[in-house]
């Protein structure tokens, strides 16, 4: 009788357990982060919702919903809102990404993200699957 134990798959976490979010901690939602960035940029320019909504060619109530994180916007709407604020879509996403990293770091007690990629397999033939 031969043992097939060596052929069994084993689960290897993509990140160490100490990097996982705390059990009770909630990660911020993307729509909330983007909304906060849009509002902060608009207020920094001392512009009204109406002014920015008109420039973006979206309704004022919809822009308000975006800023409050109540709506998930398409990339076209986000680009229009960004352009109305003198930003590119890339600028908006970079600002939101920075805010997301800041919030995640604060939630982890100040630790920073060192790599967004999964660890590389160390032995030839080793395969790691994420589910």
Image (spheres, rainbow, N blue to C red):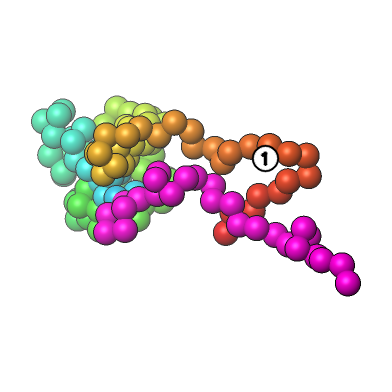
Q: Residue furthest bottom?
A: 1
Is residue 84 among the parts visible in the rendering?
A: no
Which of 69 and 85 lies nearest the eye of the viewer? 69
Would residue 122 be seen by someone viewing this image from the given angle?
A: yes
Residue under label 1, please give it. Answer: 121
Q: Nearer the viewer, residue 44 or 7?
A: 7
Check if residue 107 falls in the magenta segment: no
Q: Nearer the viewer, residue 124 or 35?
A: 124
Q: Is residue 12 above or below residue 93?
A: below
Residue 72 in the image: state x and y as whole percent: 35, 55
Spot the residue most to the right: 1
Front residue of 57 and 115: 115
Residue under the point 70% across and 59% down: 9
Q: Is residue 40 left or right of residue 83?
A: left
Q: Quick one: SS at disc 1? A: loop
Identify which residue is drawn at 22% across, 55% down: 65
Q: Is residue 44 above or below residue 68?
A: above
- Residue density around tag 1, few if under 14, some if 14–19, many if 20 or more, within 10 Å: few
Image mark count: 1
- Residue 16 drawn at (x, y percent): 47, 45
Choose top left, top right, bottom left or bottom right for residue 3: bottom right
Question: Which image quarter: residue 131?
Answer: bottom right
* Residue at 64 percent of width and 37 percent of height: 120
In the rendered image, which quarter contains the N terminus? Answer: bottom right
Residue range highlighted in magenta:
1-27
Say whether residue 71 is left or right of residue 125.
left
The image quadrant of residue 83 is top left
* x, y percent for residue 127: 71, 48
Residue 24 screen position, x and y as percent = 27, 59
- Is 23 magenta? The answer is yes
Query: Majority secondary structure of the magenta segment?
Result: loop
**Residue depicted at x 31% and y 58%:** 23
């Amino acid at each position: 009788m031969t043992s097939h134990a060596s052929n069994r798959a084993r689960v290897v976490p993509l990140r160490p357990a100490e990097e996982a979010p705390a059990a009770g901690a909630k990660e911020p939602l993307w729509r909330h982060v983007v909304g906060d960035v849009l509002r902060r940029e608009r207020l920094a320019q001392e512009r009204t919702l109406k002014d920015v909504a008109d420039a973006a060619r979206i309704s004022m109530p919809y822009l308000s919903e975006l800023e409050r994180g109540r709506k998930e916007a398409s990339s076209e709407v986000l680009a229009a809102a960004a352009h109305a604020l003198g930003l590119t879509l890339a600028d908006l996403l970079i600002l939101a990404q920075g805010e997301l990293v800041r919030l995640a770091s604060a939630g982890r007690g100040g630790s920073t993200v060192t790599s967004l990629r999964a660890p590389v397999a160390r032995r030839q033939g080793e395969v790691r699957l994420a589910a």
